[in-house]
Amino acid sequence: MEDGEPEPAEEAEKTSSDAVDDIAVSRVFESARTSRIATVLDRTEELAQLSEEQRQTAAPKISSGLVYADVLGDGINARYSVRPGRVKEDIILNAPSDFGGYAMDITVEGLTAVKAENNSVEFLNGDGEAVFVIQTPYVYDAVDDISYDINIEIKETAEGYRIAFAPDTEWLNEDERVYPVVIDPTVTSARALSNAYDTYIYDGSGNLGGLGDRMYVGIKSVSSVYKKHWAYWRVLTLPSLGSSYTITDASFIAQHPSGTSTSRPFSLYGLDGYWTEGTLTWANKPVNDTLLVSGVNRSNLTTTFSSSAVTQRVRDWYSGARANDGFMICYTDESLANPDYNAFWTCDGSTASYVPYISITYTVPTTSNVYYIRNLYYGNYLTASGTSNLSNVTAAAYSGGSNQKWELVSLGSNQYQLIPQNATSYKLSINPETNVDGNPIVIRSSSSVNSDKWRLVASGGGYMIESVMSSTGKVLEPSTTSSNVVLY
């Protein structure tokens, strides 16, 4: 991309080709950097292989930015934000002027530039695949009034292409226009590293593409007509969770640019229909949706959508019960009276901490069969009194210590060994190793007569712990004369 001085507005009789030649050209990046823009977009993760000059563009962090003052004339700045897979160029008009547009010189080899129906420009390889894309451009002013009326012309050059952007001059010069005004095209790799789609549509709109750093919800003016605006968001790949993990809560969190406000609450819908940011229109939007939560008010610059239905929707995505088709945000009250709207940051914003995201709370199952063992009658807990061989086992009040935790190791055929977690080389046993009422229960390093093997016998809403070596069904019981546990 390259910059120079602005040219006067074009005469009416000029051809499109003339306009592309004569329009002000953005010359911020020197040709050496421009010629490798596709490489930088596609390989931002390989910073070690980039030159120092390229590192200035593909910075080793989630985002970086540059501002060049007066590059297209007095009061006309260029601002660049870089994230993995994306270069966002904003042309900032600080005051009314005779600005008629600007052009971008892109040096490429073996790619063909094609303007799509949504006014984006795709650079296609020989197989017709998009290598990188200039997303649908738009222009907005300081109070978020927005226009998509930008004429794009493409001209092939010896080195590649010149792409000209000419915003509607009538819109720029309207009396109600509030400066500064920003023209916002974004160049993205077809393999951009963002893990989400988001966009918005309004009543009657075509596809608006992945439109820059914000999306709109509410009742907003489009060409002086107030229309409903809905925002869409979908994560492409869910974070990995173990199949045995349990999701206990999930929320969707989106943040707002400063300066936006609303008097109306939001609603969040779960979608059951596939969509992409490059194809979604008002006419083809998913019609199968489910209200997950309504009446949600923003808190300062953050809106949190949280409910049992949101949690269940995320569970369904993980379990495969529903396809992961994302969310839609709209106003709970969409009446056109007293129009009001809100902006949300998108995944394409230059500040990574502002992007929408899902917050998931989950529990991780225990990796072993470790339990507290409580006597149902007395309420005391099985407790190893020491850490040496033949230490007594007692019934004691709950302490939460490791000496009250026991791992049940299955031996098959409903036989178990019980391992005290304060002395894991020992096992629950009997001393002496005979089948006699009142014999104390201890922890023992080993046994040759099965005194350290036990069965679980269901009884009265719990289990009796029965000695395998007992032929008469003797079990663990608290002693009636001490705190010790005995065989009985």
Image (tube, rainbow, N blue to C red):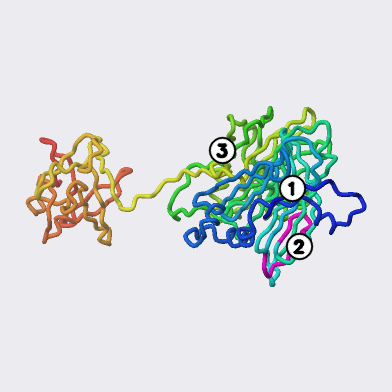
Question: What's the distance in space between the residues labelled 3 and 2, CA to CA?
Answer: 44 Å
Query: In which quadrant is the N terminus drawn?
Result: bottom right
Whichever of callouts 3 and 2 sits on the residue coming sooner in the sequence is 2
x 23%, y 49%: residue:
465
Would you say residue 276 sits in the magenta stretch? no
The residue wearing badge 2 is 114
Q: Position of residue 249 (x, y in %)?
A: 50, 41
Closer to the eye: label 3 or 2: 2
Which-is-in-front pick, marks 3 and 1?
1
Q: Residue at x 65, y 30 (%)?
A: 259
**Residue 402's image quarter?**
top left
Residue 431, visible in the rendered structure: yes
Along the horizontal axis of the image, is 482 left or right of 19? left
Magenta stretch: includes residue 117 = yes
Q: Which mark is residue 307?
A: 3
Q: Amino acid at mark 3?
A: Ser
Label 1 or label 2, whichever lies nearer to me, is 1
* Residue 27 percent location from the top left of the image: 68, 52
**CB-based contact (under 8 Å), mark 1 and mark 2:** no
Q: Which residues are magenta?
A: 108-122
